[in-house]
Image (spheres, rainbow, N blue to C red):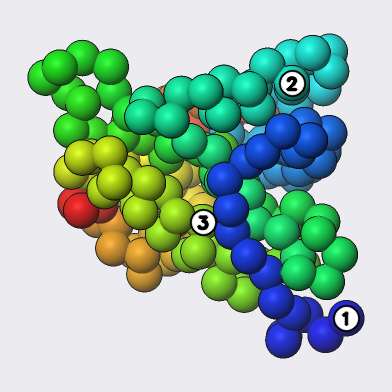
């Protein structure tokens, strides 16, 4: 398959995606341990039922959270994912946070991340959300550039959010007003 012209589509997560979501998430945690607050070993130890519950949560909480995946049109394989979760309180429901953004290496730079981010923005607008927030490790230049291209701006730095291999990692805080 020619990756330059490979087609993909983004869609909400659905029942039956559990195993593929698990594999995709674990791959991201393994390859990019400082990009996520979650830990690979902890996630890998979760039983299949945990992943079923995870998908089910996003199927049932339609006005509070959503999960989107990108899949290859050639074979239906999941190639990217993200989640978006709205704040709970009446005073903060105007904002939502984007989490767990990951695109397989072979698909990076092909517009997959942008399409997933736009899916999150479309969901957010449909639910009255006025801004999307996310955090990204300060040295993750490709991700920062992607977020900037997709309308996010930096509004701060959260220091020492992660400790991995005895090193501290700061996070850029970014927002996209809808």
Q: Residue 1 carries which label?
A: 1
Earlier in the chain: of badge 3 and badge 1, it is: 1
Q: Where is residue 82 in the image (x, y as percent from the top left)?
A: 55, 44
Q: Closer to us: mark 2 or mark 3? A: 2
| Residue 85 in sight | yes
Can you identify the residue that label 2 sits on? 52
Earlier in the chain: of badge 2 and badge 3, it is: 2
Q: Which mark is residue 116?
A: 3
Residue at image location 47% in from the left, 43% down from the top = 137
| Residue 41 in sight | no
Please tell me whether mark 3 sits on a helix, a strand or a loop.
helix
Q: Closer to us: mark 1 or mark 2? A: 2
Neighbours of disc 3 within 10 Å: few (<14), some (14-19), many (20+) = many
Q: Residue 36 carries which label?
A: none
Neighbours of disc 2 within 10 Å: few (<14), some (14-19), many (20+) = some
- Direction from residue 101 to residue 137 in the image, left or right: left
């Amino acid at each position: 398959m020619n990756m330059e012209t490979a087609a993909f589509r983004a869609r909400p997560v659905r029942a039956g995606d559990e195993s593929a979501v698990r594999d995709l998430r674990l791959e991201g945690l393994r390859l990019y341990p400082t990009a996520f607050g979650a830990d690979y070993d902890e996630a890998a130890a979760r039983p299949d039922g945990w992943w079923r519950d995870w998908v089910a949560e996003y199927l049932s909480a339609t006005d509070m959270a959503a999960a989107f995946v990108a899949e290859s049109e050639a074979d239906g394989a999941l190639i990217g994912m993200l989640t978006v979760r709205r704040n709970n309180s009446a005073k903060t429901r105007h904002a939502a946070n984007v989490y767990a953004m990951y695109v397989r290496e072979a698909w990076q730079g092909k517009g997959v991340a942008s399409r997933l981010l736009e899916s999150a923005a479309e969901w957010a607008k449909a639910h009255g959300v006025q801004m999307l927030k996310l955090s990204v490790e300060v040295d993750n230049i490709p991700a920062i550039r992607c977020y900037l291209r997709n309308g996010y701006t930096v509004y701060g730095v959260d220091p020492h959010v992660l400790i991995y291999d005895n090193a501290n990692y700061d996070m850029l805080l970014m927002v996209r007003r809808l």
